[in-house]
Image (cartoon, coloured by chain):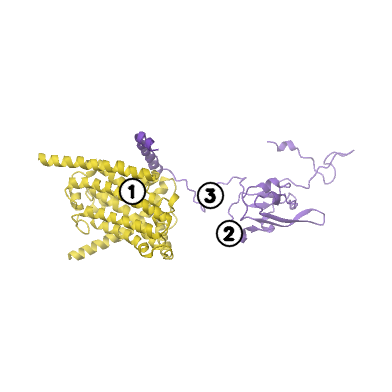
Chain colours: A purple, B yellow
């Protein structure tokens, strides 16, 4: 190390002077600071922030209480209890997400078979008490469909039988062209 | 006014200005460092963040005046006082105005060097009395560094003394009426600035308080007002070295059109800007590099410069 310093003493001085000059120039450049409460950095639409539970286009809860999100969650911050309504449709009786544990990895969103649980770009969730970071179902459930506006888990096209093609019976919808989802 | 009254009033003015400008300097440094790093720096408290230091001071004042149970209480309390006293004391010989300093000392420059030497005790006592490993390591480094670089600093100032023929700072200023010594003594000037930076324990010589390895070095265990005293002492020391550099190399208050104190302030500000710029630019030295740089490069250069200066002065005296 010392040999290097001796050998390249001139280069060292030149390097120091160059660095000093660059630093000197920097004070005349515009600061890159974003003054947060007044100014905000743009957030990507797919940013992984606060988690919500969405509803399907008919206004029903999308969540069917399958527990996949709770299972996949690496920090075990999701807890729920599934139950059934009078028509046999499953829904969560209660649903808790502990945001003081959540790492916003988005695995729950990927695991969800019904697109019910989704991450949103909202990141301003500061609280003074840890307990307030445990969100109950009322806090999580939103009125809209979030991403995937048209998707409903209970929509089906049926099967082809004699005299009836897919999606022709009552309650059936025409099949989705799965290829239009491809990029 | 009686001589005592004049001295007292000068003391009051100097002390007041210093204690006002010291905190301002903290703000200046933080803002300037911000600009160097393309940040804004503190800008929330008061206009342009000017009151940031006031807020920090209030925070420090209201903290508990705490002496750790494992510390040696007497030197622990004494250490920050020594720093503040020595630094403020050294300002007594700085000629801010034409009328001279608070006390017109014939050994003014020696007094400054003595005061900065006594200042080393503050750091050593703080480190040893704190009785913690970080503080001890920081104090050890600080003592070694300050003593090593003091030599080079004194030798660089000695060549100025040779030219001026006096230790009195006012005489040194008047000797520079025609030409500031920075032109005649560029080597001594560079040595003084580098050694001064080391004496201040500022980047790139901030090993004594290298925060990444030693938490805060010798003042790790300090909090509240005692920490504030160290902090204030550091910034006052910055002003002191800037003032001495301005006096000995840039001709103090000499300058056209403007009155002496204004010129003095401008020259001091130049050095302070230089110190902050250096902090923004240079990474920290390694300890062995620091020592070998001080002893094997800076000291011989200062010595050689002194010898050459002395030879020229003697030759000129013999010639005339």
Which residue is depicted at the point 19% across and 49% down?
A: B172
Q: Is the N terminus of chain A in the top left, top right, bottom left or bottom right quadrant?
A: top left
- Real-space CA distance between mark 1 and mark 3, rounded to the nearest whole angstrom: 42 Å
Residue B177 in sight:
no
Q: Could you tell me residue B37's position as x and y percent?
A: 43, 45
Q: Chain of mark 2?
A: A
Q: Could you tell me residue A128's position as x and y percent?
A: 57, 61
Is B52 placed above or below B285 here? below
The quadrant holding residue A129 is bottom right
Residue B10 in sight:
yes
Residue A127, label in figure: 2
Is A114 placed above or below B87 here? above
Q: Chain of mark 1?
A: B
Nearest the camera: B167 or A106? Answer: B167
Nearest the camera: B191 or A20? Answer: B191
Residue annotated with mark 3: A40
Is B44 placed above or below B65 here? above
Judge from the rendering whether residue B107 lies leftward or rightward of residue B61; answer left or right. left
10 Å neighbourhood of mark 2: few (<14), some, or many (≥20)?
few
Q: Could you tell me residue B316's position as x and y percent?
A: 13, 40
Residue B198, label in figure: 1
Q: Earlier in the sequence, mark 3 or mark 2?
A: 3
Nearest the camera: B59 or B136? Answer: B136
10 Å neighbourhood of mark 3: few (<14), some, or many (≥20)?
few
């Amino acid at each position: 190390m010392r040999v290097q310093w001796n050998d390249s003493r001139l280069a060292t001085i030149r390097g120091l002077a160059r660095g000093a000059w660059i630093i000197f120039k920097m004070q005349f450049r515009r600061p890159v600071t974003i003054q947060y409460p007044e100014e905000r950095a743009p957030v990507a639409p797919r940013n992984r922030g606060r988690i919500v539970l969405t509803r399907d286009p008919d206004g029903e809860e999308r969540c069917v209480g399958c527990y996949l999100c709770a299972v996949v969650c690496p920090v075990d911050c999701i807890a729920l209890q599934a139950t059934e309504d009078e028509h046999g449709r499953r829904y969560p009786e209660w649903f808790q997400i502990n945001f003081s544990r959540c790492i916003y990895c988005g695995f729950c969103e990927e695991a969800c078979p019904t697109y019910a649980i989704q991450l949103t770009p909202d990141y301003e969730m500061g609280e003074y008490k840890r307990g307030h970071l445990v969100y109950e179902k009322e806090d999580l459930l939103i009125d809209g469909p979030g991403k995937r506006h048209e998707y409903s888990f209970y929509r089906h096209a049926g099967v082809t039988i004699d005299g009836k093609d897919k999606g022709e019976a009552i309650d059936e919808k025409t099949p989705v062209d799965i290829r239009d989802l491809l990029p | 006014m009686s001589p005592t009254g004049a001295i007292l009033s000068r003391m009051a003015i100097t002390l007041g200005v210093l204690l006002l400008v010291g905190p301002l300097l903290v703000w200046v440094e933080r803002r300037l460092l911000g600009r160097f790093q393309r940040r804004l720096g503190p800008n929330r408290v008061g206009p342009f963040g000017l009151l940031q230091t006031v807020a920090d001071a209030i925070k420090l004042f209201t903290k508990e005046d705490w002496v750790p149970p494992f510390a040696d209480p007497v030197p622990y309390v004494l250490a920050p006082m020594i720093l503040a006293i020595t630094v403020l004391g050294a300002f007594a010989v700085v000629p801010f105005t034409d009328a001279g300093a608070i006390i017109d000392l014939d050994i003014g420059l020696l007094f400054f060097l003595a005061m900065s030497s006594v200042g080393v005790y503050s750091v050593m006592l703080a480190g040893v009395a704190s009785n913690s490993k970080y503080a001890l390591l920081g104090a050890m480094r600080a003592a070694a560094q300050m003593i090593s670089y003091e030599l080079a600093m004194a030798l660089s100032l000695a060549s100025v003394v040779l030219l001026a023929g006096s230790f009195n700072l006012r005489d040194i200023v008047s000797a520079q009426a025609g030409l500031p010594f920075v032109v005649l003594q560029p080597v001594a000037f560079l040595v003084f600035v580098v050694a001064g930076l080391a004496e201040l324990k500022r980047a790139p010589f901030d090993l004594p308080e290298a925060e990444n390895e030693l938490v805060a070095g010798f003042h790790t265990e300090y909090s509240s007002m005692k920490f504030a005293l160290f902090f204030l002492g550091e910034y006052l020391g910055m002003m002191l070295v800037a003032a001495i550099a301005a006096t000995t190399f840039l001709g103090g208050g000499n300058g056209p059109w403007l009155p002496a104190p204004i010129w003095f302030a401008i020259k001091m500000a130049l050095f302070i800007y230089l110190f902050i710029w250096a902090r923004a630019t240079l990474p920290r030295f390694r300890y062995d590099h620091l020592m070998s740089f001080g002893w094997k490069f800076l000291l011989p250069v200062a010595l050689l410069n002194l010898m050459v200066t002395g030879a020229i002065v003697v030759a000129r005296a013999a010639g005339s």
